[in-house]
């Protein structure tokens, strides 16, 4: 590190990069404020001014890892959009990036504030908007009833996929299961709202 003192956004990005590297290498359990501060070339006070506890930094670091644009497929059909979206989510969740998320979720069992922060800051709202947009496009094409443009309908495919990981413990979900989620759960639910 140079002798120049970093401030503001530059320092924040250095801390987030360091925390993300710690998450990737050591998992949430091994990520300490001391290790992040040393890796970022700063002190713990600089971290605590931005993130009041380890859980907040862990979530921010995970979101830093997730800074790729949210997928938003537009294949021309609701089935195609839903399958492509689930395939992209599945690819992310089964990657090393997904391993970090699973590590955070496991840690949340022992740290209730971590789970609350994950719910609050997870980016789920932007994913929900993508699914709602899919349903709106399908309704505009006459492919889905307008009543199907509903938050619970929109979130169902991701919740079912999440259960495959969380409840069944799958490290990756086979494509045929993604097709079943769309064809046997999501599309009948959409059609049933008419």
Image: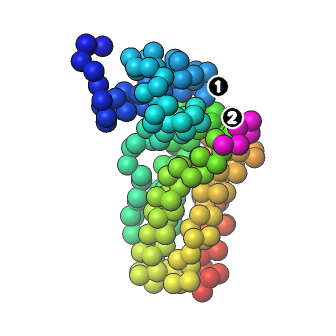
Image position, residue 86 (x, y; %): 54, 54
Q: In which quarter of the image is residue 105?
A: top right
Q: Specify few, some or many for label 1: CA neighbours under 10 Å numbering under 14, 14-19, or 20 or more.
A: few
Confirm or deny contact between disc 1 and disc 2 (CB under 8 A): yes
| Viewport quadrant of the C terminus | bottom right
Q: Is the magenta stretch mostly helix, strand or loop?
A: loop
Image quadrant containing the N terminus: top left
Q: Please, is residue 93 above or below residue 26 in the view? A: below
- Specify the label residue 43 is tagged with: none
Q: What element carries label 2?
A: helix
Between disc 1 and disc 2, whose residue precedes? 1
Residue at image x 43%, y 27%?
Answer: 46
In terms of secondary structure, where does tag 1 sit? helix
Report if residue 110 lies within the magenta region.
Answer: yes
Judged left or right of residue 123, residue 54 is right
Report which quarter residue 166 is drawn in: top right
Seen in the picture, residue 155 relative to 27 is either above or below; the reply is below
- Residue lying at the far bottom in this picture: please name it: 194
Mark 2, residue position: 107
Which stretch appears magenta? 109-113
**Mark 2: few, some, or many residues within 10 Å (few <14, many ≥20)?**
some
- 112 drawn magenta: yes
């Amino acid at each position: 590190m140079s002798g120049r003192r970093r401030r503001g956004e530059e320092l924040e990005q250095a801390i987030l990069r360091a925390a993300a590297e710690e998450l990737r290498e050591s998992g949430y359990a091994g990520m300490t404020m001391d290790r992040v501060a040393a890796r970022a070339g700063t002190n713990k006070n600089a971290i605590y001014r931005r993130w009041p506890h380890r859980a907040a930094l862990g979530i921010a670091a995970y979101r830093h890892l997730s800074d790729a644009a949210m997928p938003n497929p537009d294949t021309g059909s609701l089935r195609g959009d839903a399958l492509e979206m689930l395939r992209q989510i599945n690819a992310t969740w089964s990657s090393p990036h997904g391993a970090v998320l699973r590590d955070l979720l496991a840690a949340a069992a022992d740290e209730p504030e971590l789970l609350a922060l994950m719910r609050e800051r997870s980016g789920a709202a932007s994913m929900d908007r993508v699914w709602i947009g899919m349903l709106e496009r399908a309704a505009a094409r006459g492919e889905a009833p307008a009543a199907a443009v509903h938050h619970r309908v929109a979130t169902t495919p991701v919740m079912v996929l999440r259960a495959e990981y969380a409840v069944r413990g799958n490290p990756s979900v086979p494509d045929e299961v993604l097709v079943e989620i769309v064809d046997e759960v999501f599309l009948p639910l959409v059609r049933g709202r008419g």
